[in-house]
Image (cartoon, helix red, strand yellow):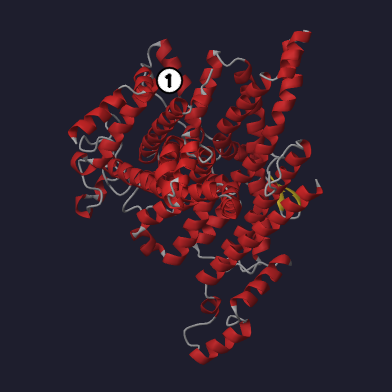
Amino acid sequence: MTTATLSRWDRFRESFLWYSFKRDKVAIASFVVLVLMVLAAIFAPLLAPADPYDLAQINIMNSELPPVGLDGSDPAFPLGTDAQGRDLLSTILYGTRVSLLIGFGAVLLQAALGILFGLLAGYLGGRVDSILMRIADVQLSFSTLMVAIIVGAVFKASFGNLMFGEIAIYMLIFIIGVSEWPQIARTVRASVLAEKKKEYVDAAKVMGFRTGRIMFRHILPNTLSPIFVIATVQIANAIISEAALSFLGLGMPETQPSLGSLIKSGFDYIQSGSWWITLIPGLVLVVLVLVINLLGDWLRDVMNPRLYKG
Amino acid sequence: MLAFLVQRISQAVLVMFVISVIAFAIQDGLGDPLQQMVGMSVSQEEREAIRDEMGLNDPLVVQYLKFAGNALQGDLGTSYFYGKPTLDVILEHLPATLELVIGASLIILVFSVPIGVYAAIRPQAWLSKFFMGVSTVGISIPVFLTAIVLIQLFSIGVTVDWFPEDAGWGQWLNAALSTEGGLPSYGRGDELTPLFGTWNSGFFSQGGILHLVLPSISLASIMLPLFIRLIRAEMMEVLQSDYIRYARAKGLSSARINFLHALKNTMLPVITVGGVQIGIMVAYTILTETVFQWPGVGLMFLEAITRSDIPLIVAYLMVVGLIFVITNTVVDLIYGLVNPTVKLTGKKA
């Protein structure tokens, strides 16, 4: 078993992926920043000076303190506090955790849906293909954000505020996953169409394998690299969608904030001069999305040689 | 061509049918109109009688047909909050949103074409690389965050005092980095010019235009990077084509080649894709209008959600659905007209 993992590691070290990663400074920098942010989010309970979910630790007298370096700041709160007196650094760490969780969860869901529907449409063809792709076209023409806002609005109206707040994470994963599946389904379908003409598929058919086995065991592994590229960009999109929904009040409640709901709660106080409550989480969100997008760009260039830029 | 026309239009009708079914399902699943109308004191028998009378006990298909029939006649129910027909409420709010979209489109048009063309003609110039870098960053900034930053900079204003005030350069840097503020960040102002019907325009007064500035820039910020990339990509493809090479061989001036021959063929796909993107902008107006309290349909929709004003939510879905379907169909038809090689979907190859 150990030899198998070792050889896989060796193979990775000799791959083109690793070679081009080593030579691309932007990719390395983005990757380092992303890993740091993910680690900070995972270990938020250990790193954060305070627990923003614990009401006993919050003192309203500490509300709207500015970050260290400005007049009236308190060294106990390095990035200042929000309007409820929560330590902003801690809420941002926990908020990044929520945003990343929803981003990854939503992409897992849309990848599952997209791979299933894309494989079915591409391999079976005919009526299945035209119905599924029609639905995908229509959904895309409405823009995924619009679909997510409408589904979110309907869910919120039917569950009520309190109930929605409790299950908000799962709701958001579901809403964003369902509203963005066409992107992945289209990519999968396109590569399945190319793959299914190849000889190994004919061979598998001649050997009498079942359709399901050919689709998932033989064709799917060969379509993974475009899925990987688009899934990376989709994580960034999912995080932005989540932030937008939360900003509109259709997402995470303020008691369990994501980066989007932090920006929203801070926006109410921007006119009184407390810019840091909204702009610092905003900056974190932009950096997070930017590094994921840059990594996605790099992956696309490496994995899809046809798109090599001049 | 006729087959193409019929196919596209029947597809549009089908999509509109699906939207109306979804809207009907939302109306049916979310609201009990009886509860909104009668109090607690009404007995169970009386409730049933009223339900029968209102047709709420009819089979779902009959209820849907009634809903669709009313919708076709322009009757989408009455808003709980405004106490007016929902379509009137939407028509009152629509001009504000349209002006926002027009303002943003103007900004996109003015900036995306020169930048995109420049980046295509000189892909290696540092200015092109700068623009492409900025547009990558621009895609990563959510529209509401751009709006908030704009409000902080140009409405509230920023005073910078990081540099020593006694040195000349420090004073200059402080002044250069500080912003004045003062631009309106709330609503449309009160200097609106009535045009026709419910359309009060902000384009004809200084106050109205000042109110438009920040919201339009915010809305444009999300689409501008996409358009710059699109124009650049299309233009670079056109510049590779044979007829451009022929024009060069013939000795035409590069300005004539770039702007007369290449740009003309670049703009065709840009206009069709652009048409769809303008439709997608409707989704972003919800965010922009929320930040700026802009009294358009996006803000109206969001308020309808918080007020559980179900008829208004349903009417908004129908109207926005119709706008999407019409823009997409028209764009498809134009594309089919100017580019006859477009493949008819559904036709066996």
Q: Residue at x 71, y 45 (%)?
A: B344
Point 51% across, 33% down: residue: B154
Q: Residue A162 sits in which quadrant?
A: bottom left
Q: Nearer the viewer, residue A270 or B271?
A: B271
Give me the residue at 72% from left, 55% from top.
Answer: B198
Q: Is residue B281 left or right of residue B142?
A: right
x, y percent for residue B346: 67, 49
| Residue A67 visible in rendering | no
Quadrant where the C terminus of chain A sits is top right
Task: Please state the horizontal and vertical placement of residue A91, each as a whole percent of the image.
Answer: 29, 44
Can residue B235 be seen here? The reply is yes
Judge by depth and name the residue closer to the eye, B308 or B341: B341
Mark 1, residue position: B174
Q: Chain of mark 1?
A: B
Look at label 1 and name its amino acid: Asn
Q: Nearer the viewer, residue A211 or A69?
A: A211
- Residue depicted at 29% across the width and 45% down the height: A63
Where residue B78 appears, x then y in whole percent? 63, 69
Q: Which residue is most to the right?
A: B2
In the displayed structure, A3 sits above or below B129; it is below
